Amino acid sequence: DIVMTQSPEYLPVSLGARAIIQCKSSQSVLYSSNNKNYLAWYQQKPGQPPKLLIYWASTRESGVPDRFSGSGSGTHFTLTISSLRAEDVAVYYCQQYYSAPFTFGPGTKVHI
Amino acid sequence: EVQLVESGGGLVQPGGSVRLSCAASGFTFTNYWMTWVRQAPGKGLEWVASIKEDGSEKDYADSVKGRFSLSRDNGKNILSLYIQRLRAEDTAVYYCARAGRGPQSSSWLDSWGRGTLVAVSS
């Protein structure tokens, strides 16, 4: 199984500041035949289901603000919130969909 | 609008069983892999199982193999998860989610229901 890790576990950020979340996979999730990274990011606010933010490691889902961006390849990935807004307070998860079981990272709690 | 509505959760005794359902609407159900993800209270997300659009393929997490059974009724647009021999560690909110890539198992999850809580306790 591919093990996903995230850092930090808790991330205090000031309003308007940049937030950077790291995600690592225990093996590469880059599929050589199509050169795509099978990595997604989700946001979960209290009492709500997760919401898809990013897929293919860097493709923003429709309707997601452009202050959210994803980068990285292979085993190291980053989610960046360029200018934190109050409504971005949430837990953020990465997930690999390269191979079953499609494991999630443990989450990073972003707070102000 | 895509809608996924889970039901069937509740308080169940250890060793018991429960059937969860997910009613799908707003999209062509038969074009999508579907997935269950669970979240224990205060914990992270755990992928549980996925099923191919025609039901012919299923993948399960090792932690649930042999006790969880996934099925779908494409005539009624309903996804089901049957859980038997329930344990305390199965206590979680169970979410139904749609595969964003449609007929591909290796996919992100682009739409989620609000979940149904299964609490295992005597």
Image: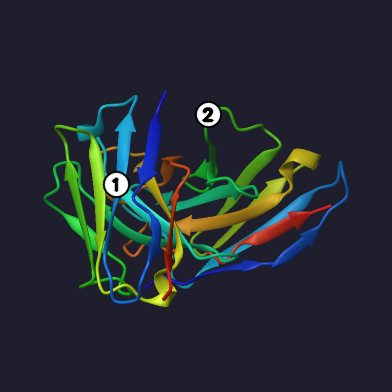
Tell me what residue is drawn at x 24 percent, y 39 percent.
B78
Q: Is residue A43 above or below residue A10?
A: above
- Image label count: 2
Counting from the top left corner in percent of width and height, residue B66 is at 20, 73
Looking at the image, residue B62 sits to the left or right of residue A26; the answer is left
Evaluate if marks 1 and 2 touch, with contact meaning CB atoms under 8 Å apart: no
Q: Is residue A85 visible?
A: no
The picture places residue B1, in percent across and down from the top left corner, at: 42, 23
| Amino acid type at image mark 2 | Ser
Residue lying at the far left in this picture: please name it. B56
Single out the mark in the foreground, 1 or 2.
1
- Mark seen at residue B21: 1
Closer to the camera in the image, A108 or B76: B76
Q: Quadrant of residue A86?
A: top right
Q: CA distance from mark 1 to mark 2?
A: 28 Å
Where residue B33 sits in the image (x, y, percent)? 26, 44
Q: Quadrant of residue A91?
A: bottom right
Query: Which residue is tagged 2?
Result: A62
Q: Residue at x 40, y 57 (%)?
A: B10
- In this rendering, position of residue A6 left or right of residue B46: right
Tag 1 and tag 2 share a subunit: no
Q: Residue at x 79, y 54 (%)?
A: A111
Q: Nearer the viewer, residue B121 or B60?
A: B121
Chain for mark 1? Answer: B
Classify mark 1: helix, strand or loop.
Answer: strand
| A62 lies above or below B92 | above
Q: Amino acid at mark 1?
A: Ser
The image quadrant where one finds the N terminus of chain A is: bottom left
The chain letter for the residue carrying disc 2 is: A
Q: Secondary structure at mark 2?
A: loop
